[in-house]
Amino acid sequence: MLKHILRKIFLEDWAMKLVALGITLALWFGVTGLSKPGSERYNVPLNLRLPDNTIIMNAPAQEVEIKISGDDRRLQQIKRGDLAISVDLSELLPGDRVITLDPSQVSIELPTGIKLDEIQPNKIAVRLETAIEKEVAVKAETDGDVPEGFEIYGESIVPQSIRVRGPASFIRSLAAISTEKIDLREQTADFTAKQVPVVVSNPKATPFETVVDVNFRIGEKRIERTITIPAADSGNRRIQAIVFGPRSLIEQLNTENTSAQIVHDDAGEESARLILPPEFSDRITVQKVRVLH
């Protein structure tokens, strides 16, 4: 029986079996003979996964040098741009920490048969701080002055405030953020500076909105003037008023286009009222009026 089995294994279809053995040996020698161990070094990005609501305050290394080893043919197929080291810091509390970059504790995608042997530097220092958010007022910054004879009556910013996220120590003391400077040197009328970038002095702080619109009200330079006008239906009595507005309008006020009245309340107390020309009333402010005795 044994003799029959051996004959069947080794002598029947021996030519086909010999070819199959040859092919197998050739493939084995081709794979093992061409395969040789090797190693390479690369500078690769270092990615840190931070805890939620935490900001890294210092500037740790952006790249590290790694040594990888394995089948030399596979090593030659690796592209540096495909490699990156990731380190999970999500369990760390705020404060100063020293992180060990151990090959067994970092993440990197490598082909089968390639292993990570070394990371340099193998330690990095990080300083973590809690991140908070706050609504902060926006302040318009300007460059130059409006032309002579003109002035800024007022300004408004849309939005008036912006939410900013950043390190707690910075955000708590942040009262306002500024816009980039807006040139006023050629402006003689109302205008809107659109999509003006805002500037946060701390690079670790991030505004939720990055631009604002700033509306300027600009007009003729205003002056203050004291005028004396006879009070209507009050004999020779007069009133004195202090008015404020554009120079050209203020200088036009006189007894012909301006009038005054003396009025009495229920208690008999008297007061005075200055009546401006209708076309001036919304552009001139009456600051003070009194009856002259």
Image (tube, rainbow, N blue to C red):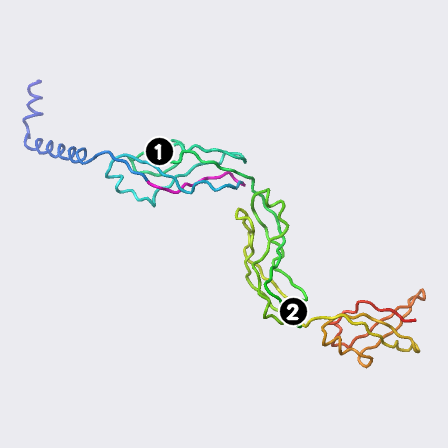
Local SS, label 2: strand
Circles 1 and 2: CB atoms closer than 8 Å: no
Reading the image, the residue beneath label 1 is 118
Q: What residue type is labelled 2?
A: Ile
- Indicate the position of residue 71 as horizontal and vertical percent values: 25, 35
Check if residue 242 falls in the magenta segment. no
In the depicted view, which residue is nearer to us: 184 or 46? 184
Say left or right for 143 vs 26: right
In the depicted view, which residue is nearer to us: 280 or 4? 280
Image quadrant where residue 190 sits:
bottom right
Please determine whether, in this image, residue 94 is positioned above or below residue 8.
Answer: below
Q: How many callouts does the rendering have?
A: 2
Q: Which amino acid does label 1 sit on?
A: Glu
Quadrant of the image containing the N terminus? top left
Q: Residue placed farthest to the right in the image? A: 268
- Indicate the position of residue 262 as horizontal and vertical percent values: 89, 72
Image quadrant where residue 264 sits:
bottom right
Q: How far apart are marks 1 and 2 (CA)?
A: 66 Å
Reading the image, the residue beneath label 2 is 218
Image quadrant where residue 194 sits:
bottom right
Main SS category, magenta section: strand
Q: Which mark is residue 279?
A: none
Say left or right for 281 vs 179: right
Quadrant of the image containing the C terminus? bottom right
Say left or right for 114 vs 289: left
Magenta span covers which residues? 42-53
The residue at the point 84 percent across, 69 percent down is 289
Q: Residue placed farthest to the top in the image? A: 1
